[in-house]
Image (cartoon, rainbow, N blue to C red):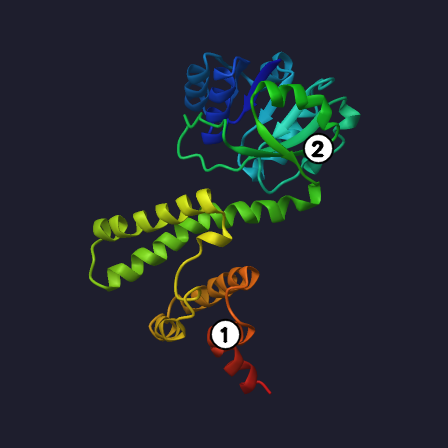
Amino acid sequence: MNIGFIGAGKVGCSFGHYLKQQGFSIVGYHSRTRESSFYAANLTRSSPLNFGELIKKSNYIFITTPDDQIGDVWNKMVDFDLSNKKIFHMSGCLSSAIFTNCKDKGALCYSLHPLFSFAGKESSDLEKVVFSIEGDNIEKVEEFLHKANIKYFVMNKEDKPLYHASAVFVSNYVVALAKIGQNLLLQCGLDKDLSTDGILPLMESALSNISQKGINDSLTGPIVRRDTSTIKLHMENLPKYKEVYEELGLVALEIVEEKGNLSNEKIEEIYKILRSDSNEEDCGNI
């Protein structure tokens, strides 16, 4: 297998580095800038290549550009002989359908995406990361996936947007929630450093609990304790983030309901508190 990358950002560099460590032959990189191509090539002990060279020398081609460039890259690739090549993009949201007329070109096309947030270009510890893959004839690339020690599941094309939304919730929006927590502590008079020091152990312990106990058994807080007075106090003092609190509170209430820890009456009471504003708006529209 001769592997080439089009795109030399965080994902392309990190995944290429990982594959190199797994014993694969990395042919080289093509990128928009000479500097990024050379950086990635140096990292993987491969070569910076022009577009045509990379297509010709590679039989496994990974497109690791931003999503809005994948279609343009493919439209450029179809001018070359793609017979018997395996072509992947690594977008979380887009499916392999972006590779129009792939079969007519004699290629096999896939989307392969890691459920992982790449902080830099050398994040190569991917053996515990779960990947999604979809495309035609998955069995044709199973040998590669197993040799690369990739833990993966096969998904349907039409599920890619929902799948990627899941990744956004548990990665990007965790950062957004941390920002909300920090902002509230700043309002209490803490500085940024101390507020960060304050929220990190909370977040780390929550993730540790999920790892050890599972999601449903890791929920703590006023909803689990049936502490309606605390929930009301929170909502009275959260003018900016009140809607976020309400929606996440309803998700927490779903968890409690699944576990059967609260009576139907208590669940309904908490639900009405969390939905108090929307109920008032509905009444006003009658």
Residue at 77% over, 21% down: 106
- Local SS, label 2: strand
Q: Quadrant of residue 125?
A: top left
Q: Which amino acid type corresponds to the residue marked 1 in the rendered image?
A: Lys
Give the left or right position of residue 100, taking residue 16 as reference: right
The circle on residue 135 is: 2
Residue 258 position within the rendered picture, expressed as x and y whole percent measured from the top left: 57, 60
Residue at 20% over, 62% down: 189
Residue at 48% over, 21% down: 18
Q: Quadrant of the N terminus?
A: top right
Residue 109 position within the rendered picture, expressed as x and y whole percent measured from the top left: 69, 28
Closer-to-camera residue (259/102): 259
Q: Quadrant of residue 230?
A: bottom left
The mark that comes first in sequence, 2 or 1, is 2
Residue at 61% over, 12% down: 57
Q: Quadrant of the C terminus?
A: bottom right
Q: Which amino acid type corresponds to the residue marked 2 in the rendered image?
A: Gly
* Labels 2, 1: front one: 1
Marks 2 and 1 in Cβ contact (< 8 Å): no
Residue 231 position within the rendered picture, expressed as x and y whole percent measured from the top left: 39, 71
